[in-house]
Image: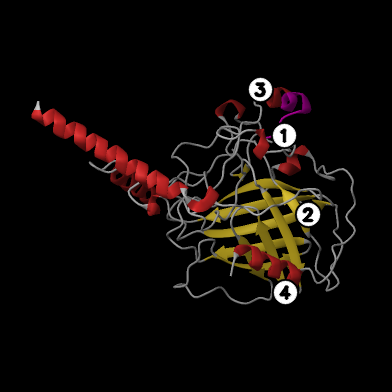
Amino acid sequence: MSYRVLIGIIVLVTLVAPAGAWAQGNPATQGYTDADLVKWPPPPPSYTPPKTPWGDPEIQGTYDFLSRIPFERPDQYKGKAVFTDKEWDEWEKANPGNMQGYNDFWNNRDYIRDRRTSLVIDPPDGRIPPRTAEAEKKLDAYAAAMRAPGRGKYESWEDFRSISRCIAVNTPQGPMDYNSAVIIMQSPGWVVMVRERVDTRVIPMDGRPHLEDNMREWNGDSRGHWEGNTLVVDTTNYTPKQLGSGSRKPETEPGASAGANFVPNGISFGNFHLIEHFVPISPTRIHYYATLEDPTTWTKPWTFMLPWEKQDKYQMLEYGCLEGEISIGNALRGERMIEAKEKAAAEAAKKK
């Protein structure tokens, strides 16, 4: 069954009830102070969402979370969690949006206004906690393997990230450069999140237990429930094949990218436990909190918050992964060509 047909079926099944009447008001953080924006756990919002016909809080809609706030707090903002309006305006001018390898055709530049100096809110210093000695050993071994004599950058398709292989984007999903929309749909006992890139999360809400430990998935096994008006999703059972894509350095640069740049390349998701809180704070905004814990990777759990803004006019198109699915093959062929050229050069040098 094609991805397009699958999404069509999901939409038909889940939209059994029309979305509630959403107020088109100020998308700002209703009733939230600057201090509230960086609190964990988050304070209860003053906003009360409408109810679905079966009595659940209704958060359906198309959301975007385009952000260029640094994931971790830069050194120059140590001790400062939130900019003033003036400081934000100055920072925004000094840090324009950067699509790197893509032009503006791929991005409407509709960044969500967010005056925090980092997405990480716990620990309060805005930095991911230190990694464990075990994790550092894994990273050392991974780096050594990648630098092994005779090894190129791409030995096989398994050297590419899961998003590059059109398998799955990461969960939790951090900020992205483009194609950053999510459609939330609800039906009795289910919440569905159709992500613009590659995959869809289907989350049961009926209290069933997690899968047995030997059953592993790229985005883990998710179970949801409501705590008041907050959607809480607990995820375990990640496949160890899912790896991070970041570096060992703190992620303090403005901007965003696909995948899990906050998890170093070489660290597996296999032991991750993720708890997500989707907190509706206004008719047009959800605060998304992701708490990650893995005692084999970090010395303690940590949390980041990413605002999701409701975008009624956002048109989410099919994600044509890899433009005909030739990129990986071409990259591997190019790597083999480089190796052949280097081998020929080495043989020629021996004959001299």
Q: Nearer the viewer, residue 69 or 33?
A: 69
**Mark 3 or 2, nearer chain start:** 3
Q: Is residue 88 magenta?
A: yes
**Mark 1 or 2, nearer chain start:** 1
Q: Secondary structure at mark 4?
A: loop
- In space, the residues marked 1 and 3 are separated at their CA atoms by 14 Å
| Residue occupied by mark 3 | 94
Residues rendered magenta in the picture: 81-89
Q: Residue at x 79, y 40 (%)?
A: 33
Q: Secondary structure at mark 2?
A: strand
**Mark 2 or 4, nearer chain start:** 4
Q: Are marks 4 and 1 in contact (CB under 8 Å)?
A: no
| Residue occupied by mark 1 | 115
Instruction: Please tell me whether mark 1 or mark 3 is closer to you in this view.
Output: 3
Q: Nearer the viewer, residue 61 or 208?
A: 61
Q: Residue at x 27, y 40 (%)?
A: 339
Question: Is residue 266 visible in the rendered structure shown here?
Answer: no
**Colour scheme used in the picture?**
secondary structure
| Residue occupied by mark 4 | 189
Q: Secondary structure at mark 1?
A: loop
Q: Amino acid at mark 2?
A: Pro
| Residue occupied by mark 2 | 280
- In space, the residues marked 4 and 3 are separated at their CA atoms by 46 Å
**Mark 1 or 3, nearer chain start:** 3
Instruction: Please tell me whether mark 4 or mark 1 is closer to you in this view.
Output: 4
